[in-house]
Image: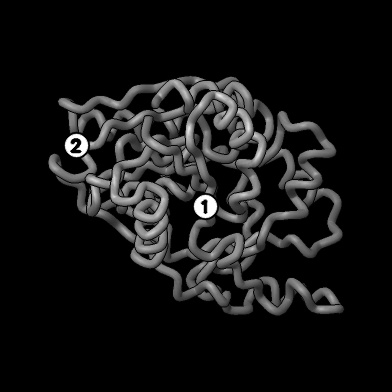
Amino acid sequence: MPSLVLVHGFWHGSWCWSQVLAHVVATGHRAVAVDLAGHGLYARRPRWFTARRYDAAAVDTEVSPLAGVSLDDAAALLTSQLGLVGGGEPVTVVAHSAAGPVLTRVAQRRPDLVAHAVYVSAYMPASEVPAAAYTRVPEAADGRVAPLLRGDPARTGALRLDLATDDADYRKRLREAFYGDVNPALAEAATGLLTPDGPMGVMLGTTTLTRDGWGSVPRTYLVCTGDVALGPALQTRFVAEADAAFPDNPTCTVKLDASHSPFLSVPEELADVLASLG
């Protein structure tokens, strides 16, 4: 069975997969969670986040220390991680949310390293379309993350959450966007582990998809039907575009009754689905 490599989305870290990993390993699979570029051990926090005095103006204007991180950078890191985990053999890669375009780039350039591409409520952009473009399509109109973002990404170089604010309403809306069906205590703990900046360069990069590249890799899309961050309508659009472009390699679709964070709300169910893909 190919090893499983789990990749988190923006603002999170490999920590978010801990409960899923336990269940997956119990099924006999080899699995590991890795950090996306600009996150986890690669995170770099802006000055305002740790300042002794809260500065709302700095939240909106300070250039992110991750402003230079591109889709190329993120893909290069993931490629190296896959090579290390698989030892040159293909692995099953599971991408959540904004890790989707990174997986797509890696699978296009190194399809030999990806036995199966799995997207969990993730961006799965079409050929030569940046993931950021999908934030402006009709299917994204009701997404609850965009209203939480602070500053102008063109200026800061990041998609930024204000994780230093003591605004109770803001923090409530953030938990609802990501963790609507998660145990409140667990949701609060997860919120405390988030980092404020996601590198905008990952969302702006594009990948030209080909039949012998990404189009040749088996793929599965896990639609989270209760997601209010990246809604089911947008998730369904990704699948439709992929299948229209590569009809000979259709996407297998699995529905989960979960919010944007099934790794916290239904970890055992998610693990069972991932284990079955091996």
* SS for dot 1: strand
Q: How is the image coloured?
A: one colour
- For badge 2, the amino acid type reads Ser
First along the sequence among labels 2 and 1: 1
Q: Where the N terminus falls, by quadrant?
A: top left
> For mark 1, does the 10 Å Cα neighbourhood hold few (<14), some (14 to 19), or many (20 or more) residues?
many
**Residue labelled with disc 2:** 216
106 versus 202 height, above or below: above
Quarter-of-image position of residue 84: bottom left
Give, as a three-letter code, the residue at label 1.
Answer: Val
Q: Is residue 220 left or right of residue 68?
A: left
Q: Label 2 neighbourhood size at 10 Å, few (<14), some (14-19), many (20+)?
A: some
Label drawn at residue 34: 1
Q: Position of residue 155 (x, y in %)?
A: 52, 75
Check the image and report above or below for 73 versus 125. Answer: below
In percent of width and height, residue 86 lies at 36, 47
In percent of the image, x 84 and y 38: which residue is there?
Answer: 185
User: What residue appears at the point 30 percent right and 42 percent down from the top-left corner?
Assistant: 90
> In front here: 229 or 137?
229
- Looking at the image, which is closer to me, 61 or 254? 254
| Residue under the point 47% across and 64% down | 200
**Is residue 259 among the parts visible in the rendering?**
no
SS type, badge 2: helix
Would residue 6 appear left or right of 190 to someone viewing this image?
Answer: left
- Quadrant of the snapshot with the C terminus: top left
